Image: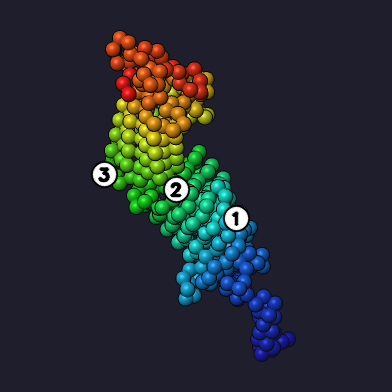
Amino acid sequence: MMTNNKIFKSIVVCLMTLLFLFPETGLAGTARISPDKSVQDAIYKSQPGDTIEIQSGTYFENVVVTKPLVIRGVDTGNGLPTIDAGGMGSSITLLADGIRLENLNFQGAGGWDEAGILIKSNGCTVLNNTAKNNHGIGIYLVNASNNILLNNEAFNCNFGIALNSTSNNTLRNNSMYGNMNNFLAGRSSNDIDTSNEIEGRSLYYLTNKSDMVIDSSSNAGNVYCIDCSNITIKDLMVEKNFAGIYFQNTSNSFVLNNTLLNNSMGIFFLDSEENCIEKNTITDNVYGIYLKADYLNCANNTIDLNNIYKNDYGIFLNIEGNRGQSNLIFNNTLIGNKKDNAFSRGEAKWDNGSVGNLYSDYSGPSTGCSDSDGNGFCDSPHKIRGGPGVDNYPIFRKV
């Protein structure tokens, strides 16, 4: 039998051998990476459950994580470390479930579908990171669920945080600012509360809510309503988002007296019915008001008394056939929208039987509209571009 002394010496020899073969790995499965080393190489050498500590400096890499690891930035005297994609691809892509990513900066992602942090897995925790100066997206979740995003910042990107076909992700205390579009969530249902901020104001992401009023006292910087009813959104100023106000499968709700500017879409209704959009000022967006029928109808909505100007498109209905024919659009002012004041792929009611809309491209003698009887309406109907829509009572304005 070996003596205790021999056993101890054998253990020491084994440990020294491990340290010699794997000099970047400590006894607890921790690799410490300095700027002269590769983060990707450390990931390749690691085992599931290991920790990789990245020291101060800039690492020019496209990192891909395919194992459940802890990846942590450590300030060793020159600030938290940065992973820089160099203008191509994503800075880091999470492909394994159960990754923990913390205390790092991510920048230089290139391409609209690339990100500082790209998450394509489940059950990951992403906290205390900064995604900045990315051509694409700061933090992007795609087909991902049950992830936690906590205390992250995203700024100076085309999109701050984007969620695409995701579910059951939890977002808390994340901040988006200075992005072309701060927040995007499409076909998603997640747990996102008002601790998340857009330009210093609260993100309202409502799911299965009813009988609520969100007004100027809420300090809302963006409002999402998913599977909601009887929600009133009024007196807000919303800017720099994918959709300033977003309805998905939402009904019997009101969007009143808001100012929507510099969004990709000022107001976006998806598969939503029996709502009212009234007395809003909508300017300098790509689309002022956008209605779309996808899986369900987008019908029986009323759009009236809105001032819609200097967008690329004023009112855009992406509804094929008669699935939106009962949408009523009247008494709106549509002026100087660069590509189209009004566009509709399917049927809708562009007047209420006595009053239509004011169009800067069809409102007076210089645009082909005359009012011979002086009743305040053009003598001839106005054809809405894109489909069968007709405004029978376009408003006359002598210009």
Mark 2 or mark 3, which is nearer to you?
2
> In this picture, is 96 found above or below 264?
below
Q: Mark 2 to mark 1: distance in Å? A: 19 Å
The amino acid at mark 3 is Ser
Identify the residue at image location x=69%, y=84%. 13
The amino acid at mark 2 is Met
Identify the residue at image location x=26%, y=44%. 217
- Nearest the viewer among 76 and 120 is 76
Dot 2: within a 10 Å radius of its alpha carbon, few (fewer than 14), some, or many (20 or more) residues? many
Earlier residue among tags 2 and 1: 1
For disc 1, the marked residue is 88
Most extreme residue toward the left, as rendered?
A: 217
Q: Are marks 2 and 1 in contact (CB under 8 Å)?
A: no
Most extreme residue toward the front, as rendered?
A: 366
Q: Mark 1 to mark 3: distance in Å? A: 42 Å
Q: Is residue 388 left or right of residue 16?
A: left
Identify the residue at image location x=41%, y=41%. 263
Q: Position of residue 277 (x, y in %)?
A: 35, 29
Q: Mark 2 to mark 3: distance in Å? A: 25 Å
Figure quadrant of residue 228: top left
Mark yes or no: residue 317 visible: yes
Earlier residue among tags 2 and 3: 2
For disc 3, the marked residue is 217
> In this picture, is 152 found above or below 240?
below
Q: Position of residue 71 (x, y in %)?
A: 55, 64
The amino acid at mark 1 is Met
Q: Which mark is residue 180?
A: 2
Earlier residue among tags 1 and 3: 1
Q: Are marks 1 and 3 in contact (CB under 8 Å)?
A: no
Identify the residue at image location x=53%, y=56%. 116
